[in-house]
Image (spheres, grey):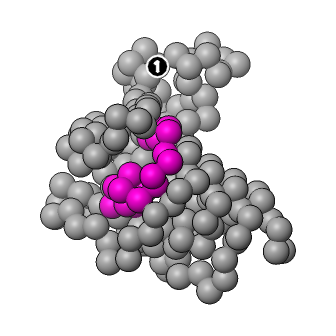
Amino acid sequence: MPILESLSIRSHFEMVDTPMLPTKFMFLKYLIIYMGITGERSPSYDYFSLASFLDASPLLETLTLDVTQLEMHHESVFEGSLQLGQMPAHHHGCLKTVKITGFTSAKSLVELTCYILKNAESLECLTLDTLSGTSRCYLGISIMSSCDPMSEDIFLEAPRAIAAIRTYIEDKVPSTVTLTVLEPCKRCHAKGKFVGV
């Protein structure tokens, strides 16, 4: 597929890190990586390894990454020191929009986000959604009058995710980039609207 411009990848059971890609997607502009809510990822899965997709796609403009899960099993950035992964720096001159759904305080996820901020020179918009992002009443994107339910574990993880954003990411966001952080809904989720795990 030498002229592929749009790619959507779904994987429900990631157990090993994403390898360095041996080929290049020379024309890829839109990339969606969905690691489904129903699957389980190894607690040792390194989200930072997904940066290899950026390096393999020099014309990438939009990256959407959905890492939503029902429980947070990964090492939190607050449990150790933050060090950017050992991947050589590459400058991504076309990447404009990044959205990460299911953002948690997972150390490797914070590292990936910092890597993007450091290397995506043309970045305009970064959205970090601490929930599943499917339906929010306060964004006007829900056909219902309330937000979708979430697992209690992720509801309890959301404040840590927000703290990780404030501690490790906010000060790295250039003035030319719009950072949007989507938090749990104070109206719906404060009432304990959870799904069973």
Q: Is residue 14 above or below residue 20?
A: above
Q: Which residue shows up at 28% across the image and 67% down it?
A: 84
Magenta span: 111-128
Is residue 18 inside the magenta stretch? no
Q: In what quadrant of the picture does the N terminus appear?
A: bottom right
Q: Relative to 74, say whether 141 is above or below.
A: above
Question: What residue did someone put label 1 on?
Answer: 188
Measuring from the top left, give residue 156's x and y in whole percent: 31, 39
Depicted 89 relative to depicted 102: above or below: below
Kindly indicate the quadrant of the structure image that contains residue 115.
Answer: bottom left
Which amino acid lies under the numbered mark 1 shown in the image of this protein?
Cys
Q: Residue furthest bottom?
A: 22
122 to the left or right of 89 = right
Residue 124 lies in the magenta-colored region: yes
Residue 196 visible in this rendered orientation of the protein: no
Describe residue 20's horizontal placement relative to residue 154 as left or right. right
Q: Secondary structure at mark 1?
A: loop
Q: Quadrant of residue 45?
A: bottom left
Q: Residue at x 52, y 16 (%)?
A: 138
Toward which corner of the image does residue 87 lie, by quadrant?
bottom left
Mark 1: few, some, or many residues within 10 Å (few <14, many ≥20)? some
Is residue 137 among what the camera can see? yes
